[in-house]
Amino acid sequence: MRERDEWKTTFKIKFGLHEWLVMPFALTNAPSTFMGLMNHVLRILIGKFTFCTNEVVFLGFVVGSHGVKVDNEKVKAIQSWPTAKSVSDVRSFHGFASFYIRFVKNFSTLGAHLNEIVKKNVGFKWVFVPRCFKECAINQVGAGPVSGQ
């Protein structure tokens, strides 16, 4: 071990700080371990790289220079969501839509009507409000980026 690298092996016990003057047991295989990582893990996978682009799709969002917006595939999923036929269906949609809360203006106001529908001991009654909520969510989620996020 080089003299200038001894500080890197410092450890603390109740009697003070100690550092190794020679290579400790755990680090003796460090060069070969790192070489193995380089050969089998840290390799270039050209298929995963994107060059010269303004937007990148990452975890269901499109991240670009103008901000973050929802991926078009997710907007299509909201648009093609089937009409709710039970309280469970409404809860499902509300949970899915809640993930995109930062993209929908006045989400809590729109979602309050859904909360009324899914309360316990209240009979399921499909009204116009959930459809309106869905339309508003679709329009706002697909509208554009949320900047600075």
Image (tube, helix red, strand yellow):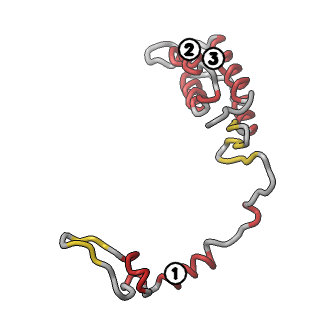
Q: Are marks 3 and 2 in contact (CB under 8 Å)?
A: yes
Residue at the image point whose x is 44% and y is 18% from the top: 120
Numbered tag placed on residue 92 in the rendering = none
Mark 2 nearby-residue class (10 Å; few <14, some 14–19, many ≥20): some
- Label count reads 3
| Nearer-N-terminus badge (3/2) | 2
Q: Which residue is mark 1?
A: 33
**Residue 2, quarter of picture:** bottom left
* Mark 3: secondary structure: helix
Residue that mark 2 sits on: 113
Asked which quadrant contains residue 137, the reply is top right
Q: From the viewer's perspective, is residue 149 above or below residue 104?
A: below
Judge from the rendering whether residue 11 lies leftward or rightward of residue 80; answer left or right. Answer: left
Residue appearing at x 51%, y 84% in the figure = 31
Q: Amino acid at mark 1?
A: Thr
Q: CA distance from mark 1 to mark 3?
A: 57 Å
For this orientation, the residue located farthest to the front is: 4
Left or right, residue 9 beside residue 123? left
Residue 86: where, in percent of width, then height? 58, 22
The amino acid at mark 3 is Pro
Q: Is residue 32 above or below residue 93?
A: below
Residue tagged 3: 130
| Callout 1 secondary element | helix
Tell which of 46 and 117 is nearer to you: 46
**x and y percentages locating residue 96 in the rendered image:** 60, 32
Callouts 1 and 2 close, C-beta under 8 Å = no
Of labels 1 and 2, earlier in sequence is 1
